[in-house]
Amino acid sequence: MSQSDQLSAELAIAVAQLVSELGRSAATDALRTCLLTVCDRAACGDVVFTEIDGTLCANDQAVDAPETALKPLIAALQQHGVAVLSIEALASPKELLLMANMLSEPSSGPTARLDVRAHQLGCWHVGFTMHSEREAAMASEEASASGQPRATVSSALACATPADAITFAQGLTEQLQSHALEKDVVQCTHLLLDLLRMEHHTAALGESAEEIGAVWSATFDQLASASILQLVAQLLPSSDMPRADVLAVLQRAGDSGAGALIARLIGESGRVERRALFDAIVEMGAGLPLLLRSLGHPTWYVVRNAASLLGAMKATGAEAGLVQTLGHADERVRLATTTALARIATPAACAGLNAALRDRAATVRHRAFRALLTLGGSAINAAALGDALELERNAGMQRELLAALVATRSTDAVQRMVKLCSPSSRGAFPAELRVSMLEALLQLRPTTAMPLLRMAAEDRDPAVRRRARELVAKPVAAAARETAGATA
């Protein structure tokens, strides 16, 4: 099992346990312990859980865990009609607790849909997709595929020459101007959608319709101005038009379409609307130039949103801008940026994650460390791990950082271990960790460790002194046994 699959399984088990504890109204200490475990595992990376006929999958792989350990989570997903549960690495403890609490509650019918409630409660980084929503989306796609073209499209297809198409396009331009003056958002969008369909239909006819197709393309480009696209973007969180149709128009407009959504996201205050806009931008995968420029915006949440979008889009090429954003004054921005680099996961992004190991905020350092552990291999830099270890004050994280540093078995690791084990660093770490450092250095470079062990044998801390003397005595005893064997 890969490290990523292992972490996903541990998260599933932790969520199942938290749901179970909440369902039976467990004591505060038990809930806190479960929640801390969920938070720790969730921070390791985005996970999408799906439940299919009683089997739980994480990122399209069956979760390798005992059925009894997963049962509370599977039962809760089935009870509430949840097809997909997505947990992002950025999810806060509050979001994760709300998620588990909603799953632990009895189902109250369609008025208590978890996806709607999650948005209303501000769960940006935890999402539910209901079985009913999936089925409706599939039905909508089937209906769209088999539907008849609108009258406008049929009339356009009757154009025999480019001149006919130009005349027809002039009429469409006048219609759009009229709809725009009346602020008729639906009709504006329908007209652009018709042009898009006309493009597709003429393209299917091949070279014989190439010139006419060019007229429809040019007309779309002319009519899809910034002001019109802003009108189209208003439809996205509403139900006045199918989401797929609105997205198709904006997608055809490219960066301009994405720009309309990004502008709306900046000014939108509603939680549900913001999430719908965010998801649409990610789905489009456009607007990278604007997002990169937004990393320098003076408002912190604009920068955070841009970083989150770049990460969700896995925007290779954005690494340099994101690495620069790691110097932002707001910790929330740096945390979102670290998560974005983890999602992009290129060598340049890994270099940024190693830089984040030196961040002044523990939350950022921990997120970067978890991401690097998940990526594995040569992603972790020994020098950066050493710096993180010197900054760290959490005992459990200190042990993990030390283990990762030793695992690199590099020259940089040895040099940093020498510094950490020297008398000048004795006040920076607890006795237990200092002993672990001495043992690790002895394992990596026995000859380098011996002088430091002899100095530690006179340390003022009794635990360090006792263990150092034991370690010094072991090589001496081993050498004596080898000498005795050779003499015999």
Image (spheres, helix red, strand yellow):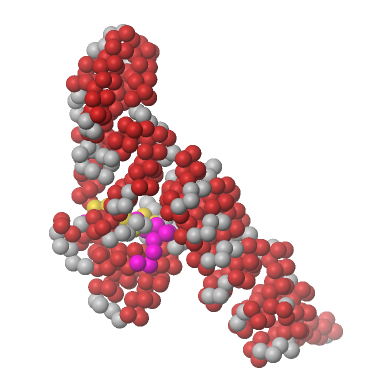
Question: Which quadrant of the figure has residue 225?
Answer: top left
Q: Is residue 304 visible?
A: no
Does the magenta portion include 151?
no
Q: Residue reaching furthest front?
A: 181
Residue 413's x, y, as percent? 68, 66
Residue 62's x, y, as percent? 36, 56
Q: Residue reaching furthest right?
A: 487
Task: State left or right for residue 397 relative to residue 22.
Answer: right
Q: Please determine whether, in this image, residue 383 is positioned above or below residue 461.
A: above
For the C terminus, the image quarter is bottom right
The residue segment tinted magenta is 81-94
Q: Please determine whether, in this image, residue 239 is positioned above or below residue 372.
A: above
Q: Is residue 280 visible?
A: yes
Q: Residue at x 38, y 67 (%)?
A: 93
Residue 198's x, y, as percent? 29, 21
Does the magenta portion include 88?
yes
Q: Residue at x 22, y 48 (%)?
A: 133
Residue 308's x, y, as percent? 44, 51
- Nearest the camera: 96 or 335? 335
Task: State left or right for residue 310 relative to residue 191.
Answer: right
Task: State left or right for residue 412 relative to residue 316.
Answer: right
Question: Which quadrant of the figure has residue 179?
Answer: top left
Q: Residue at x 33, y 49 (%)?
A: 268
Q: Residue at x 26, y 25 (%)?
A: 176
- Nearest the camera: 105 or 485? 105
